[in-house]
Amino acid sequence: MLTIAQLAPLKDRDPYLYETLVKIVASVNATSQRAGVDPNTPAPAPSPIASVTVQATNGWFDISISDPSDARPGLFYFAESDVTPAFGAPRVYFMGKHFFGGPIRSTSGRCRQPR
């Protein structure tokens, strides 16, 4: 969180500068909270994704993730697969990065079944 201790004396001397600096400080603090980098306000855990769809054809797998939540930019999406339900040694597939502030409707990827 950004604070500027020297703002108080400016309030009477130069009210326009004071208001401008207060707005800049508020914007910087809001941006750091939204990005999850504010050390005073830890970022909440992202909400669960809405659905994962997997389609397999001839050894190829199409994996689609739908996330309608208002996620923070910078979230990474992964898919995992394993030969056992216990996921003892899963393979991890990177699905992409969330760049925008709005919801992700769908992210998809393709992977080939190992031989």
Image (cartoon, helix red, strand yellow):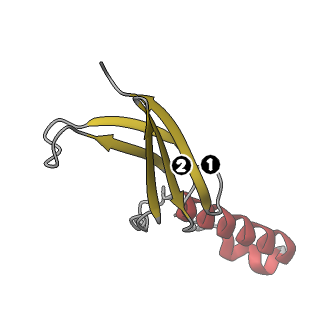
- Quarter of the figure with residue 108: top right
Q: Report the Cα–Cα distance between label 1 and label 2.
A: 6 Å
Contact flag, marks 1 and 2 (Cβ < 8 Å): yes
For mark 1, give the secondary structure.
Answer: loop
Residue appearing at x 61%, y 59% in the figure: 105
Between 2 and 54, which is closer to the camera in this rendering? 54
2 horizontally vs 28: left or right: left
For mark 2, give the secondary structure.
Answer: loop
Between 29 and 92, which is closer to the camera in this rendering? 92
> Badge 2, how many Cα within 10 Å: few under 14, some, many 20+?
some
Earlier along the polypeptide chain: callout 1 or callout 2? 2
Residue appearing at x 60%, y 58% in the figure: 104
Q: Is residue 4 visible?
A: no
Residue that numbered label 1 is attached to: 99
For the residue marked with disc 2, what is the amino acid? Gly
As drawn, which residue projects farthest toward the top?
A: 115
58 horizontally vs 115: left or right: right
Residue appearing at x 59%, y 65% in the figure: 29
Please provide percent x and percent y for residue 22: 71, 72
80 horizontally vs 7: left or right: left
The correct choice, above or below, for 55 with respect to 111 in the image is below
For the residue marked with disc 1, what is the amino acid? Phe
Q: Is residue 20 visible?
A: yes
Residue that numbered label 2 is attached to: 74
Please provide percent x and percent y for residue 9: 70, 74
